[in-house]
């Protein structure tokens, strides 16, 4: 348990430090335009990558025998 707490504290400190480095690069350095462009590029790329992964999984997954039928396909009494 002590190792997990130490690792958690290290991750917490690194994330806070990373935020301050990012804030400095974005607000106070001469690299501000490129940092902003790369941030937007990574965000859009990440979102589109997740959507592409979902599409790939939907396209390559074989249907199972226990598929859910819609209300229109159910017999009416």
Image (tube, helix red, strand yellow):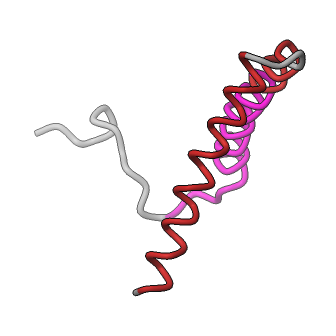
Residue 7 shown left or right of residue 58 in the figure: left
In percent of the image, x 63 and y 46: which residue is there?
A: 17
Q: Main secondary structure of the magenta part?
A: helix
User: Residue 6 lies in magenta, yes or no?
Assistant: no
Q: Could you say which quadrant of the image residue 74 lies in?
A: top left
Q: Could you say which quadrant of the image residue 52 lies in?
A: top right
Residue 14 shown left or right of residue 73 in the figure: right
Where does the image place residue 11, in percent across and percent down from the top left? 57, 61
Residue 1 shown left or right of residue 74 in the figure: right
Where does the image place residue 60, in percent across and percent down from the top left? 72, 53
Range shown magenta: 40-64
- For the image, the number of numbered tags is 0
Closer to us: 12 or 39: 12
Where does the image place residue 6, in percent across and percent down from the top left? 50, 76
User: Residue 47 lies in magenta, yes or no?
Assistant: yes
Where does the image place residue 7, in percent across and percent down from the top left? 54, 73
Q: Could you say which quadrant of the image residue 5 lies in?
A: bottom left
Closer to us: 7 or 42: 7
């Amino acid at each position: 348990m002590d190792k997990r707490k130490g690792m958690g504290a290290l991750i917490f400190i690194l994330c806070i430090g990373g935020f301050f480095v990012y804030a400095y690069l974005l607000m106070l350095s001469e690299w501000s335009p490129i940092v902003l462009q790369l941030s937007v590029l990574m965000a859009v790329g990440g979102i589109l990558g997740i959507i592409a992964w979902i599409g790939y999984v939907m396209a390559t997954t074989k249907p199972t025998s226990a598929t859910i039928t819609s209300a229109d396909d159910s017999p009416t009494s």
